[in-house]
Image: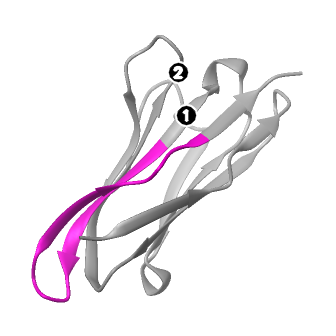
């Protein structure tokens, strides 16, 4: 099973930017799917961005044009660049990565979550 470590969250003013990182480790052969979710207090977890290797990324309407998901396959790391942040973007953000290990086992792993707070 792959382990994911998230970083990059924090406090930012409205209109600001943050970049989240999600580094995967653990004998990974390839990453097939990378998703970013977020969960605000009292709300259900929602899918923010979803990318399947070789396909385009799908974004939630609420973040379209402001957030960009990307990956560095050499580093087994996925990113979420968040621009023009709004107070309603405040949430705990989670990465979910699915793929194949060197031993040809499928894995489905979650990051520990990172807090993003947008406030003046």
Image quadrant assignment for residue 84: top right
| Rendered location of residue 14, percent (x, y) | 82, 27
| Rendered location of residue 68, percent (x, y) | 55, 50
Instruction: Please state, as top left, top right, bottom left or bottom right, where the N terminus lies in the image.
Output: bottom left
| Rendered location of residue 72, percent (x, y) | 49, 76
| Lower sequence index among marks 2 and 1 | 2
Up/down of 19 relative to 103, above or below: above
Up/down of 83 relative to 90, above or below: below
Task: Report the side of 100 relative to 85 (left or right).
Answer: left
Q: Label 1 belongs to which residue?
A: 92
Instruction: Give the secondary structure at mark 1.
Output: strand
Instruction: Give the secondary structure at mark 2.
Output: loop
**Residue found at the far right of this picture:** 120
Q: Which residue is drawn at 81% across and 31% down?
A: 15
Q: Is the magenta stretch mostly helix, strand or loop?
A: strand
Q: Is there a contact, CB below 8 Å, between mark 2 and mark 1?
A: yes
Q: Residue at x 47, y 10 (%)?
A: 42
Q: Label 2 belongs to which residue?
A: 40
Residue stretch in magenta: 94-114
Instruction: Please state, as top left, top right, bottom left or bottom right, where the C terminus lies in the image.
Output: top right
Q: Is residue 13 magenta?
A: no
């Amino acid at each position: 099973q792959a382990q994911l470590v998230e970083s990059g969250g924090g406090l930012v003013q409205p209109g600001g930017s943050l970049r989240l990182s999600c580094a995967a480790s653990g004998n990974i052969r390839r990453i097939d799917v990378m998703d970013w979710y977020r969960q605000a207090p009292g709300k259900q977890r929602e899918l923010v961005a979803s990318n399947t290797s070789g396909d385009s990324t799908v974004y939630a309407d609420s973040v379209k044009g402001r957030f960009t998901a990307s990956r560095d396959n050499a580093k087994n790391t996925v990113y979420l660049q968040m621009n023009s942040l709004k107070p309603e973007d405040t949430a705990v953000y989670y990465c979910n990565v699915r793929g194949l290990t060197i031993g040809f086992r499928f894995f489905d792993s979650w990051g520990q979550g990172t807090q993003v707070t947008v406030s003046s």
